[in-house]
Amino acid sequence: MTKAFNRRLTKKDQKVFRKQLKAASAEKDVETAYKSLIQKAFDPDGLDFAWSSPFNTDGVFSELANSSLFNLQQSPAIFYKNYAVLKLLLETKWNKDFKLAPVKFQTLVQAIYYLKEFQGHNEQLPNVVLIGDENECFVVAGSQLAVYLSEKLNWSIPASSAGTDPSNQNFVLQLISKSGINPYVFEVSSKELDLNNVINLIACYAQGLPLVKLKINEKNLRETFEWFINSVFHGSLKKYEPDTLVSIFVQSLTASKDCYLVPPSQKELHLIDGSVIPIDANAYISFFSRFEKNYSPKEKREITAIADRLIEETKRRFHGDFWTPTLWADKAQEVLEKQFGNDYREKFVVWDSSCGSKNLTRDYYFKELYVSTLHQSELDMSSAYNTNAISFQMDFLNDDVFINSNTQESELTKIPPPY
């Protein structure tokens, strides 16, 4: 088997694609943009592949009859056992929200009906299906849809209307609840997305290779967080505060044993504090079909460490909170050492009364440290930091503790022992 090859899209390629989408005023414009992108990625010279539109599809990207694909020394195509297997079915839409499960699966039903046309004409089935509009796209393996070609459906319905036909309503619901198909929806209009992720997924499905999940890191953090909250909390996002959303995101990535979909309905998410919240389970499953959920202790610490940036970017100031970048946290320590001595963390009792997720103190050891914050969820998220400290929830703006030489221990109601 030769090595899979697809040309890496340049920043210019991606910019041109997004410019085409932004200028699009109809579905046909969207179709043109996607076709151009796929052509650039897999066969920019147009020597081996071409677009066609059999059975009134928006497009099928497949091998030319006179292609040079079997010249293994020269061809840039994708091979499996010396046979070029990329056959992509494209379905484009206009102004759809693919994060909504009914919209996503109605379009998949349309794709299944197109596959039925290929089967009925004894033609090789497309092995990759790409569905997109001017804002989003998702990719599924043709084999995931081909298993439904034996369903007892009214196959005489035109594919273009099959997804929304009343007779297929139960089939759509079946796919949503029982199919196990939960493709990740890419925000193609976002400059944060590297479109090579879409192309690599197409290549992976074309070869029939097992899907390698992506890991969350500093580079893709913003993009994945935005997708997560906008999809998993679709329609209910405003009910949650930024710190809560970040905490749920981090818990989902780092606390796999304690953060899970509650059986049997799996419509609620169990959090590490024992509470449950309603979510879009299909979106949650879809997210983790594309992104890894198993991380080493070091990787978990890194994810938690950069989570502060999410809160800062989601809402820099929230209820008087300010989330301190690591650069300034280090600078603060430098100033304190200059004022109180390099050993001040050993000599003095330190209380960070607005600790957030402890980014002012987490990289340093304190002999006696107290940390408090307005939101319990921040303490949950940062539980791995300053483990020797006394950590507690407190609104220091409204729950101030007034302490003097005459204060009685019984009056210290806001600070946990040992006070």
Image (cartoon, grey):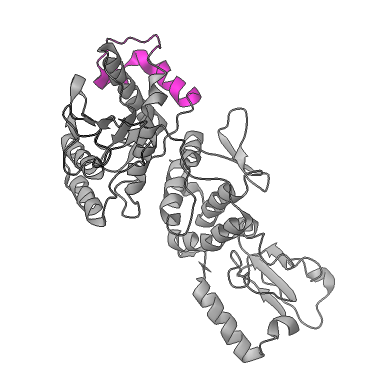
x then y, percent, for residue 23: 17, 47
Q: Residue at x 35, y 26 (%)?
A: 108
Q: Is residue 186 visible?
A: no
x then y, percent, for residue 65: 17, 26
Q: Residue at x 62, y 27 (%)?
A: 264
Q: Against 19, is 326 above or below?
A: below
Q: For residue 106, what is the image quadrant?
A: top left
Q: Nearer the viewer, residue 259 or 46?
A: 46
Q: What is the span of residues highlighted in magenta in the rendered image?
A: 150-179
Q: Quadrant of the C terminus?
A: bottom right
Q: Is residue 81 magenta?
A: no
User: In the shown orientation, is residue 341 left or right of residue 160?
Assistant: right
Q: Is residue 155 visible?
A: yes
Q: Nearer the viewer, residue 321 or 265?
A: 265
Q: Residue at x 81, y 70 (%)?
A: 418
x then y, percent, for residue 158: 24, 16
Q: Against 70, is 122 above or below?
A: above
